[in-house]
Image (cartoon, coloured by chain):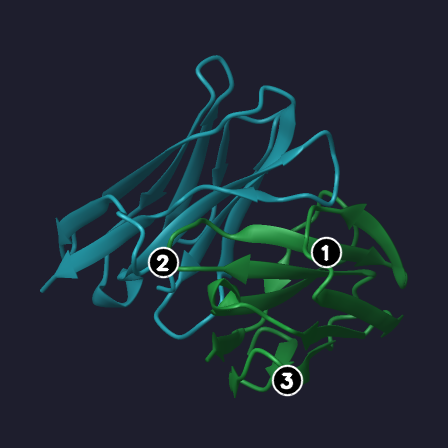
Amino acid sequence: GESVGLHLPTLSVQEGDNSIINCAYSNSASDYFIWYKQESGKGPQFIIDIRSNMDKRQGQRVTVLLNKTVKHLSLQIAATQPGDSAVYFCAETPDSSYKLIFGSGTRLLVRP
Amino acid sequence: ETGVTQTPRHLVMGMTNKKSLKCEQHLGHNAMYWYKQSAKKPLELMFVYSLEERVENNSVPSRFSPECPNSSHLFLHLHTLQPEDSALYLCASSQDENQPQHFGDGTRLSIL
């Protein structure tokens, strides 16, 4: 990813295991949340989103959970693959605006 | 392919040069964005345009000047940049506010 220099938390998982990446967001007025994946040399890639009227949403091998009470968001990746190795960012949109506020990211390393 | 194309991919310039970054989106979206991703900070929103009008005005130095001639094209004009402006500049687009933003792969800018 392009966040070299930032001290990114790193999650190391065995191939085939499930991964859980956590994010604490800051604004209780945020009503839209997105998870992005960023591989080295590329821009952030949209994975999945969730709105504040939901607490869970599933995609292909991914699930996002939203806990508004504690302002916590998580991304679960099932059967993690080497191609899942990347930096993962959560992002929030306060007040239904154009503004997207990004977290600092988590690096996921998948061990073969 | 994300549908958002940025050129050039790499740019090296002196502090007194003037250059422009270009972004084109092929997704039929109404909103376009410029972000800065540096080694020491999370992704920062710089500018937002919706239907060619600027809708977000973050605190960005005047040495960065955006231009949005139509809803498919976005430029970032650069002049008299500083070494701390070296970063990855990302363009994104979305259908509207509160919608997923889709990113290009960025321009890696180095200021000598």
Image quarter hosting the N terminus of chain A: bottom left
From the image, tell me which residue sits under label 3.
Answer: B17
Q: Are marks 3 and 2 on the same chain?
A: no
Q: Nearer the viewer, mark 3 or mark 2?
A: 3
Q: CA distance from mark 3 to mark 2?
A: 26 Å
Chain assignment, label 2: A
Q: Earlier in the sequence, mark 3 or mark 1?
A: 3
Residue A3 is labelled as 2
Image quarter hosting the C terminus of chain A: bottom left
Give the SS element for disc 2.
loop
Looking at the image, the residue that sits furthest to the front is: B16
Q: CA distance from mark 3 to mark 1?
A: 22 Å
Chain assignment, label 1: B
Chain assignment, label 3: B
The amino acid type, in three-letter code, at marker 1 is Phe
Q: Is residue A8 left or right of residue A41?
A: left
Q: Is residue B28 left or right of residue B70?
A: left
Q: Position of residue B45 (x, y in %)?
A: 63, 51
**Mark 2: few/some/many CA within 10 Å (<14, 14-19, 20+):** many
What color was chain A assigned in the picture?
cyan
Give the SS element for disc 1.
strand
What color was chain B assigned in the picture?
green
Of A18 and B61, nearer the camera is: B61
Looking at the image, the residue that sits furthest to the top is: A69
Residue B80 is labelled as none
Q: Nearer the viewer, mark 3 or mark 1?
A: 3
From the image, tell me which residue sits under label 1.
Answer: B47
Q: Position of residue A103 (x, y in %)?
A: 45, 41
Q: Is residue B78 above or below residue B36?
A: below
